[in-house]
Structure formats: C-alpha cells, structure tokens
Amino acid sequence: MPASQARTETRLPRAVMRIAADVQSRIDARNAARTGDVDPEIPPAPTPVAASPAETPPAPTPPADPRESDPGYWKQRFNVTEGMLRRERTDHQAAIRTLNQQVAELQESNRTLQASKPAAPIELSAFFTPDQIEKYGEEQCQVMANAAQAAAAKQVKELQADFDARLKPIAEARKQDQAEAAAAATREFEDKLTELVPTWRDVDTDQHWLAWLAQLDDATEVPRQEILNRHVAYKNVAAVGKMFQTFLKLRTPPAPPMTPHGGAASTPTPPAPTPPADAAGVPSDAEVRDFFKRAAIGKIKDDERVKFEARMKLRGGR
C-alpha cells in the first residue's frame, strides 16, 4: 500500500472508510458483470451497518450563561419588568380618564342639542278643520296652535304643582301616623315583655346574655341572636320572654330546702357532692368572662359546659 494511501486511511473516520469500501466493492462487481468475470460463489458485499451512536461525536454543549446564577441580574430584570407594568397601568388609567371625559362631553353635547332641538310641528288637523285652515292660512293656524299648546302646558304645570302641594301634607301625615303606630306597637310589646320579665332591660345589656345569644341553640342549631331577632320582628312577646327566662334560670341558684313549717331550714343542709371537675369552686368574674367569650366562638365542649354551669350555681346572684 502506498504511503499516501496509508496516511489518508489513518486520517479518515472509520464510518467513512466503510462507506468507501462498500462503494468500491459495488463498482468492482459492476465492472466484473460487464466483462463476464462474475463468480457465482462469491456473495455480494454486505450492506454496511450504520455507525452506532457511541461512535458519533456528541454535539457541543453551549456554555451556560453566567448571568443565570447572578441575583443582581434577576433583580435588574424584575425592576425593568415592574417599571414597564407600572407605566402600562398608568397609561391605561390615563386612557380611561380621557374616555370618561369624552363621554361626559358627548353627554353634555347631547343634552344641549336636545334642549335646542325645535319642537315638532303641530298637526293642524287636530285643532282646525280644513275650512278653517283655508280661511286663516296655515301660518296663522300654526301660531294659534302653538299658543294654545303653550297655554295648555302651563296650565298642566300649575295643576301639577298645586296637586303636589296638596299631596305633600297628606303624605307627611301618613308617614307620621305610620311612625306613631310603630312606636305604639313597640311600647305595647315592651310593656307586655316587662310583665313577663321585669328585669329584661338590665339583662339585655349583660355581657353574659350577649355571649349566650351568640351561641347555637341546641334544638335548631341556629344562633340564638337570630332566633331572638325573628321573635322581636314579629312582636312575639311570649317567645322573647321565654328566652329571657331560660337564660335567667341558668344563672339563678337553686332555692334552699324548706322546713315542714314553711320557712327556710334553720340548719344548713350539706351540699350535694359535686363532680371532681367542680372542685375549683366558685368561678371568678374573669373566669366567667373567659368562658362566655370562648363559648361565643364555639370553643366550649359539652362536658366543660356542664361543669362550668355547676360552678356558676355556686355564685348565687353575683
């Protein structure tokens, strides 16, 4: 093999050498077939196998941008984007203000045009017969019709003003009657409620009562305040009084035992045993406020409620 050919082979990739060998074998086979020197025992040249991916040199990876890991670069990008968005928002608001001003100007122009628009011509046949129109002329009839229409409009306006003046005292009196009737109904409702619950006004400002109203009713699962508002709206005195009485029973201590002679027992009766959880004794005002505050937001469990109500009975009328 010549030295030049050896140097060429060493420089060419292996895949290129295979393809060149295959092409050369095909050319040789074609030349042999033309001259009749084909040997049937010689198999045709095998089809070259494509080079495996391992032999293909990988594509060069582009170098990473060093700015991607630079916080200052991203901060600058953020500031630029924020400035663009702020400017777009400012331009949008300015455009809206301009459009609103244009709409206002167009509306004002429309009102001006409507005010300066000449009145529609009067149909003379509605006021005059054909003979009268022919006798007095269309222009004269038009003047007389306009004058009659203006006089009629003025009279209607005066009648409307007189009607409004007469109707205003009636409307005010009716409004006053309705207010007095509502006030009388409220007074009657409060008087009947006072008969049922004499101390309801004092109870209505009690913080414990307000906290109790904020809780859910056991039977309906509806806040007691909503139930009370509904009864008050319908002036249901019995239902409102029942709610006050229910609350007062929870805060009233049990009556002392009575002697056979009808008076209170001279010797104190030993108190009934209380659950161990009630051993804390009479709750203080701070504990009562904390209990009703947590009860208003639904953070009191049933067992804790029972124990605290047992302790509340020890407070008596405090």
Image (cartoon, helix red, strand yellow):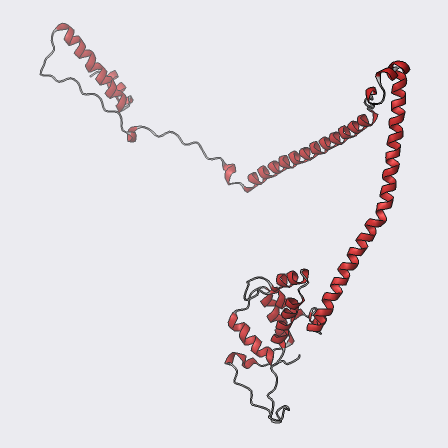
List x then y, in percent, for residue 80. Answer: 61, 36
Q: Nearer the viewer, residue 225 or 309?
A: 225
Locate the C terminus and report the quarter of the image it occupies: bottom right
Q: Position of residue 121 (x, y in %)?
A: 82, 21
Residue at the limit of the structure toward the left, as seen here: 41
Q: Residue at x 15, y 6 (%)?
A: 34
- Does residue 221 sit above or below 95 in this rendering? below
Identify the residue shown where x is 56% and y is 38%. Answer: 73
Report the label total.
0
- Residue 1, horizontal then vertical, whole percent: 20, 17
**Quadrant assignment, res 217:** bottom right
Residue nearer the viewer, 3 or 106: 106
**In the figure, is residue 1 to the left or right of 202?**
left
Nearer to me, 38 or 151: 151
Please state if 76 lies on the left or on the right of 126 as rendered. Answer: left
Give the residue drawn at x 37%, y 29%.
Answer: 59
The residue nearer to you, when weighing 97 against 129, is: 129
Indicate the quadrant where residue 290 lies: bottom right
- Please determine whether, in this image, residue 184 is positioned above or below residue 44: below
Instruction: Please identify the quarter of the rendering in which residue 211 is found.
Output: bottom right
Q: Where residue 270 sits in the image (x, y, percent)?
A: 56, 90
| Most distant residue in the top direction | 35
